[in-house]
Image (tube, grey):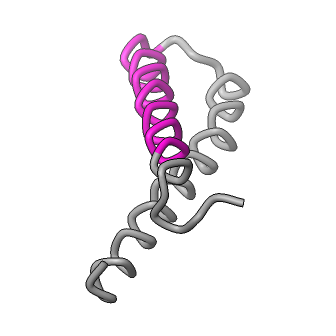
């Protein structure tokens, strides 16, 4: 199990943030093109939700570490 604040957790966070950045680029391109169907747009909702939840979790964990003075 990864230790809180350890190397594995940092790598997992970096991977999650990198994946979210790629997803953001893809969604941005789809929206900019303006030709996606409702079904195609709907297919993006779950991945966006997961990515947002991961990013919020990372920020919350960092906030808790800061509050504890770590």
Quarter occupied by the C terminus: bottom left
Q: In front here: 61 or 31?
A: 61
Q: Residue at x 28, y 79 (%)?
A: 66
Q: Name the chief secondary structure element in magenta.
A: helix
- Count every numbered label the image shows and give the total: 0
Taking the spot 57% from the left edge, 16% from the top edge, the residue there is: 36
Which residues make up the magenta segment?
Answer: 11-34
Locate the N terminus by quadrant: bottom right
Q: Position of residue 34 (x, y in %)?
A: 44, 16
Residue shown at the point (43%, 23%) measured from the top left: 31
Say left or right for 66 vs 53.
Answer: left
Q: In which quarter of the image is residue 63?
A: bottom left
User: Residue at the spot x=48%, y=50% of the render?
Assistant: 7
Q: Is residue 40 magenta?
A: no
* In the displayed structure image, the side of residue 3 where residue 61 appears, left or right: left
Tell me if residue 16 comes above or below residue 6 in the rendering: above
Q: Determine whether 41 is above or below 59 in the image.
A: above
Residue 29, image x and y in percent?
41, 16
Q: In this view, does 9 lie to the left or right of 29?
A: right
Front-lying residue, 24 or 3: 3
- Pick the residue in front: 24 or 35: 24
Vertical placement of residue 6 versus 8, above or below:
below
Q: Does the magenta stretch include residue 32?
A: yes
Question: Picture quarter containing residue 28?
Answer: top left
Residue 68 place in picture, x, y as percent? 33, 88
């Amino acid at each position: 199990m990864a230790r809180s604040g350890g190397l594995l957790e940092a790598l997992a966070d970096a991977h999650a943030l990198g994946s979210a950045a790629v997803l953001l680029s893809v969604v941005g391109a789809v929206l900019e093109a303006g030709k996606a169907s409702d079904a195609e747009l709907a297919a993006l909702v779950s991945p966006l939700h997961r990515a947002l939840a991961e990013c919020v979790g990372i920020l919350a964990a960092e906030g808790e570490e800061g509050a504890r003075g770590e």
